[in-house]
Amino acid sequence: MTFVSRRCLATLLLCTTLATLASGLVGAAEPSEEHPLEPPDRSSPQATLDTFRQSIDEAWKLYTAKNPKVREVFARARDCLDVTDVPPLVVHQVSAESALLLKEVLDRIELPLESEIPDASEVAERKLNRWTIPHTEITLVQMADGDQEGEWLFSSRTVARANEFYEKVKALPYLPGRSGGHLEDLRSGTDATLIGRFVKILPPSARAQVGDMLAWQWVALALLVLALAIAAGFAAWVGHRWSTSGRPGSRLGAYLFPLMLIATPVIGRVMIRRLFQLPGEPALWVRVVLSVVGSAGLAWLVAVLMTRAGIFIVDRGFRDARPLKKQLLKLMFRIATIIVVTGIAVKALQNLGVPVAGLIAGLGVGGLAIALAAQSTLENFISGIILYADQPVKVGDMCYFGSGRRGVVEDVGLRSVKIRTLDRTMVTIPNADFAKLHLENLADRDRVLLRENLRLPLDTPRDQLQILMAELESMLRAHERLSEDRLRVRLMQIGEYFLEVELYAYAMTDSWPEFLEIREDVLLKVLEIVESSGTRLTLPAAIRDVNEQESTPNPA
């Protein structure tokens, strides 16, 4: 914005070029009937000066005749300026103002004879790439790159100092045959569409110059800013009342204020350029501020829309999804919102002339430092995404984790997993650590293994043992909640004091509580069969030895 701050007088491109003039638009320049598409000649300092001065003189004639081609002709003059350093948001206004200011200066100072100004052949012969008008600091340079590569333009420094040059020479009379850029005619505002007639009858005090504008223009600008501020405040109040009313369509109230912010720069631009035709640096600064307000409103509106769209999609399309999936979907919408809002902010900064590339590079270095500082947090976040994608366990699953610990998964978050153990304590494990554990998910089994070892007395007769095993197998096969697949009853071991019989079957359930019921029923039937067979279950050797020692009399 250094360019804007150096402009004291702001002329009116607002007036001449774009504004009040015509709604009809440009065709193409008409350099000659033979070559209608031939561009203006800016091949040398001499050609650029001629094109520049002739274009403004012709534009003024078209403007006074209300000819819409004035925009096209005046654009030829603006294109003689190097505005690569001007913020895109105000490049049109600054280039128009600078063109009028420079025309005012050139028509008041003595220029060298045309033969003394380098033409194309002299430029090629002397290999010139810049030329300064004698006894001035007004410089023309040959563009080395860009869309106007090879053309001669007024340098960016000259454009930035155009108002300074004008202030130094504005007291001088026009040289014979010259009429200037009609700056004062345009900046008075008497041709303003809205209040032009009113301005003509204002007292001299209202048309007195105060700083960069006339007195009435300051008042008009202040009233415009005040009106826009009041409108924005009213929109915020109505939007809040509407959104909290609970009536049908009340959700639309949240959009009213950001929409008003978006409309603010459009309304301000129309009022400043087309209706009031306000010149000067203050008007440009107001436009800059309004542009920032509009960008903020657009970012706000996008954030509200994307947030509500995310909530709607998650609630309607993924109503029965797992909590982690819902959480990740919401996170994706948040990230998308941040990306879009960041893009809007970057575009707004570019329009203001902020070096976004350097800013992004700086943010990249800062982001790397933050990433290193938050390494564990990022690791847990990425591990949480991996847990969601792989899904070794889900909320509500019972699993073994770590060194044989067992519990029910109660939450799988973006940072940690929470497990309720069998003794009802809550274990919180960072995602990065949990993803490295060996996990046994009990909830994913389609059946639960029922495996019991029965120890019978060593002196159990063989025939009795065979009958007992046959009855046990028949009971298992007849049980409606046991699978016959791989079901067996086998004598597994002849120990020193017992015979060990294994019962092996699968309960047809994936629920642990149901399995406990099935096992209890099977064990009760096992006890019944053992008792009816005339035998009994024997105690483990260690317990039996203790019992025998207690029953043996003490010799002492």
Image (cartoon, rainbow, N blue to C red):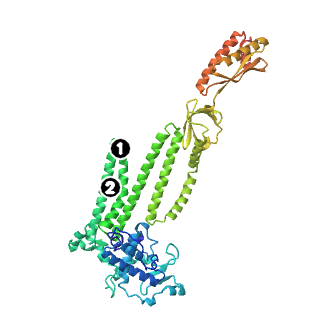
Residue 263: x and y, percent?
Answer: 35, 57
Q: Amino acid at mark 1?
A: Gly
Residue 476: x and y, percent?
Answer: 68, 18
| 228 up-or-down from 444: above or below | below
Q: Is residue 556 visible?
A: no
| 137 up-or-down from 489: above or below | below
Q: Is residue 371 visible?
A: yes
Tell me the tag on residue 130. none
Q: Is residue 459 left or right of residue 182?
A: right
Q: Amino acid at mark 2?
A: Ala
Residue 172 versus residue 248: which sits nearer the camera? Answer: 248
Residue 278: x and y, percent?
Answer: 31, 69
Residue at position x 32%, y 42% in the image? 245
* Quadrant of the rendered image containing residue 442: top right
Residue at position x 30%, y 56% in the image? 231
Tell me the tag on residue 232. 2
Disc with the residue nearer the chain's start (1 vs 2) = 2
The residue singled out by tag 1 in the image is 249
